[in-house]
Amino acid sequence: MTACPEGAGQPPPPPDAYGRRGRRPAPIAKTAGLSHRAWLEPVRSFLFASGLTLNDLVDRSGYSKTRISELLRGNGYYPAWEITFSVIRALGLPAQPMRRLWSAAAREAHKGPGWITHCIEQVALQPESPPMAHRSFTEAMADTYTAYARTFLLTDHRARWVVAETFDILWLCWDEAITSENFRRYAWQLLRARVLARAHHRRDGAPDLRAAVFSTAEVHSSVPGHVVVLSELVDLFDAIGRLPDDQMDVTVLGHLCSVPAERIADVIGLTPAITHSVDHHARATLERLLRALDPWE
């Protein structure tokens, strides 16, 4: 799941559909990077949910239909902050988290610090603070979210950056998040999507956790049989990466991040009973996967 999803699987509308109320804009260009999509996807979803047309955005922003259309598709040059701000202002979205997301995507698009600073200086922003509940939630979840992200991304810097991105998207989508059926589940699946989008994957599409052995396990060459131990750990981490989504999450949090069992349910937005059942099934699945990886079986 991604934040404010766009509804995958629907055929793209014809070009003139921008002017029809209730129709989605053409799909995002394949050249748009992960950080670019991080803010573009929720902006497009808000536009669709708002009932505004492209012509409405043109009238409210003061920019041409061509430029607004290119921005919404992530097509052509990376958009300046001024036009991006004009669109989110028309949609009533908070500017502070959006500016951070826009800046990260600008760096991803190889825009220099001078260009980014110049763009930002063109727009005066009013002070904004996230909702109190958002601040409380981020404080409560930051460490656990970062530990989970670090398992896949391997470094503190990358993990903290993705967690910060997640919290900014959550602020951007706050109204949708708090009215969702399960807020904690919504937030967790948002984090999960951002982490796995940047994780290394195997050819079959499964996240590759084998490199995490070296940052998670304490393996010393002085320990007899350490090569065997390391080989077994690599197989274990490989199998964990092949688990179904919830089983992998519960296993990573509980066994690789040392999150207490009673807290895992709260973090991932499942009931304690369901979380316990998921953990039970994960153990059985791991045993089966490890048997399949063992050449002596």
Image: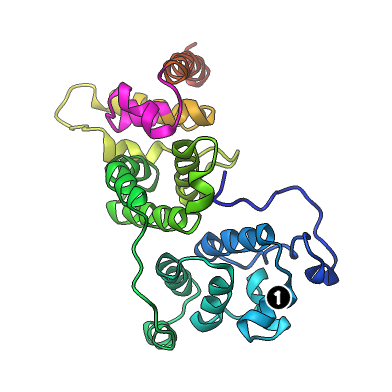
Asked whether residue 38 is drawn in magenta, I would say no
Crowdedness of circle 1 by 10 Å Cα count: few (<14), some, many (20+)? few
Q: Which residue appears at 54% of the width and 51% of the height?
A: 3
Estimate the x, y position of residue 209 in percent, counting from the top left.
42, 37
Q: Which residue appears at 53% of the width and 43% of the height?
A: 179
Relative horizontal placement of residue 269, taking residue 2 as reference (left or right): left
Q: Assign the magenta stretch its main secondary structure.
A: helix
Q: Which residue appears at 54% of the width and 36% of the height?
A: 181
Quarter of the image where one finds residue 137: top left
Residue 135 in the image: above or below residue 90:
above
Relative horizontal placement of residue 249, taking residue 40 as reference (left or right): left
Q: Which residue appears at 63% of the width and 68% of the height?
A: 31
Q: How is the image coloured?
A: rainbow
Q: Is residue 234 in view?
A: no
Among all residues in the image, which is located at the extreme left?
A: 222
Estimate the x, y position of residue 178 in percent, counting from the top left.
48, 45
Quarter the N terminus occupies: top right
Q: Secondary structure at mark 1?
A: helix
Quarter of the image where one finds residue 157: bottom left
Residue 167 in the image: above or below residue 36:
above
Asked whether residue 256 is drawn in magenta, I would say yes
Residue bearing the label numbered 1: 56
Of residues 31 and 125, which is closer to you in this image? 125
Of residues 70 and 157, which is closer to you in this image? 70
Q: Is residue 40 in view?
A: yes
Tell me the magenta residue range.
250-272
Residue 121 in the image: above or below residue 126:
below
Estimate the x, y position of residue 292 in percent, counting from the top left.
53, 18
Q: Amino acid at mark 1?
A: Asp
Among all residues in the image, which is located at the extreme top?
A: 297
Of residues 118 and 4, which is closer to you in this image? 4
Of residues 186 and 146, which is closer to you in this image? 186
